[in-house]
Image (spheres, helix red, strand yellow):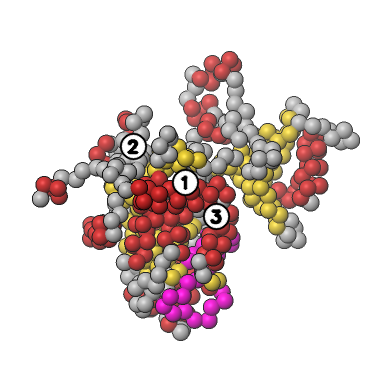
Amino acid sequence: MKENLLYERKNGFSGLDESTKAKINGFCDEYKDALSTAKTEREFCAMSVKLLEKAGFENLDEKKSLSAGDKVFCVNRGKSVLAFVIGTEPIKNGVNIVGAHIDSPRLDLKPWPLFEDSGIAFLKTHYYGGIRKYQWYNIPLALHGVVVKKDGTAINIVIGEDKNDPIFCIADLLPHLASKYNAQKLSEAFDAEKLNVIAGNIPFDDAEKEKVKHGIMKMISEKYGIYETDFMSSELELVPAFKARDLGFDRSMIAGYGHDDRVCAYTALRALADLKTPKRTAVCLLVDKEEVGSMGNTGMQSRNFENVLAKVCSLCEGSYSELVLRECLSNSECLSADVGAAFDPNFPEVFEKNNTPYINQGLLLTKYTGARGKSGSSDASAEFVAKIRNIFEENDVLWQTGELGRVDIGGGGTIAQFVANLDVDVIDCGVALLGMHSPNEIAGKFDVYMAYKGYKAFMNS
Ligand code: MN
Ligand code: MN
């Protein structure tokens, strides 16, 4: 009685047996590898397909029918992926979806990026997602992405990850000359148009003007067979060049780029890949463009999910029925798997201590997101929250709850509202981070493992 009367917080590592600790570390080592190699939505998508194929998943395009136990995936434009394990119940009973996003804040190259000023070649960038600009100065950056030539040939580029590769960098002002900037507001001191990345310094002697720019373009052209106009049809992203590492004497955390939201994407993917045939069809949905409002044909606001689900319903039923698709959606449930902000004792003033998640205290359930008076939030029903918390407790998943900071301080959104618009029950459920949206975000290892366990329990329910 006394035990249940009051809610007590608990660090997941306290009293944890050695074999579970070893399992957590093993899982997190694999996660770190994924985080260190798949740093863009395209790379994460490709990595997901590899992982799924290894687990026996087949391309949906090659299937003529679907039945219980079948495992399929479908890629959307190389940047988003949907994977299904078909359950024993009829598809109209609905599906269990765990949906995460695989894009992260970063610096994109502008369509016309290369310029020279005072003998230094630079690349102009346009930041993507919410960043604090000063965090991107003087850190090693790697260039990842694709250039598509006029004839459709795609050239994949990764520079800065191999230890013999060069890296890129934005130079910050020295403190000796920064007094004027120190007195300015952060938003004014760090101008987005000054996020210019140093790209080189050797002049091409035969050129008449812009000799350094010429030299760089000549090198790029010789190595990749591309010209300056080809940048126009490219998607090149600058991301931190470092790898994900254990954090702390006790290695209880992981520091790395892109936990938001690849920590939820990876754990959801692994949960689905490790699933035996469930009762209800289980879905792992990994989308792009969440950081810019889930827009576009690879974001959650696209009809892609409905279109693919229509195909899956048809292949399960033997023919297309609009009613079956609509019933399937209405009966479906979803965990919007996204990260939250963990309490940071260095900045207690932006959190409300009771209703905030803490690092390594378990999987975070967030009933609603949004800003101010819950504006822009999808508020999960009490009934659905009860159902989810029961699944977690039945399956030994330590969970916690919390909002994103104090009321009226800020706020944020996820894909939850767009999934809810499809008439699906949805709640936000993910890992709480320190230093969220920074180039080196921090996740708790216990929480990472609870995400895997929690998502799997939900897919199986
Ligand atoms: Mn996110
Ligand atoms: Mn985010």
Image quadrant occupied by the C terminus: bottom left
Which residue: 58% across, 55% down? 42
Which residue: 53% across, 30% down? 134
Check contact, mark 2 vs mark 1: CB within 8 A. no
Residue 139 drawn at (x, y percent): 58, 33
- Whether 79 is among the magenta residues is yes
For numbered disc 1, what is the local secondary structure? helix
Q: What stretch is highlighted in magenta?
A: 61-83
Q: In this view, does 98 lie above or below 311?
A: above
Q: Which amino acid does label 1 sit on?
A: His
Which residue: 43% across, 39% down? 251
Q: Which residue is most to the right?
A: 206
Q: Which of the marked residues, 2 or 1, is nearer the chain's N terminus?
A: 1
Q: Which residue position is annotated with label 2?
A: 343
Q: Which residue position is annotated with label 1?
A: 259
Q: Residues within 10 Å of mark 2 (few under 14, many from 20)?
A: many
Tell me: is circle 3 under 8 Å from ligand 1. no
Q: Which of the marked residues, 3 or 2, is nearer the chain's N terminus?
A: 3
Residue 19 drawn at (x, y percent): 36, 51
- Residue 364 seen anywhere in this rendered image of the structure: no
Q: Is residue 401 above or below residue 91?
A: above
Q: What residue type is labelled 3?
A: Phe
Specify whether 450 is left or right of 259: left
Q: Which residue position is annotated with label 3?
A: 44
Which residue: 37% across, 44% down? 432
Q: Which amino acid does label 2 sit on?
A: Phe
Specify whether 202 is left or right of 87: right
Q: Which residue is most to the bottom?
A: 318
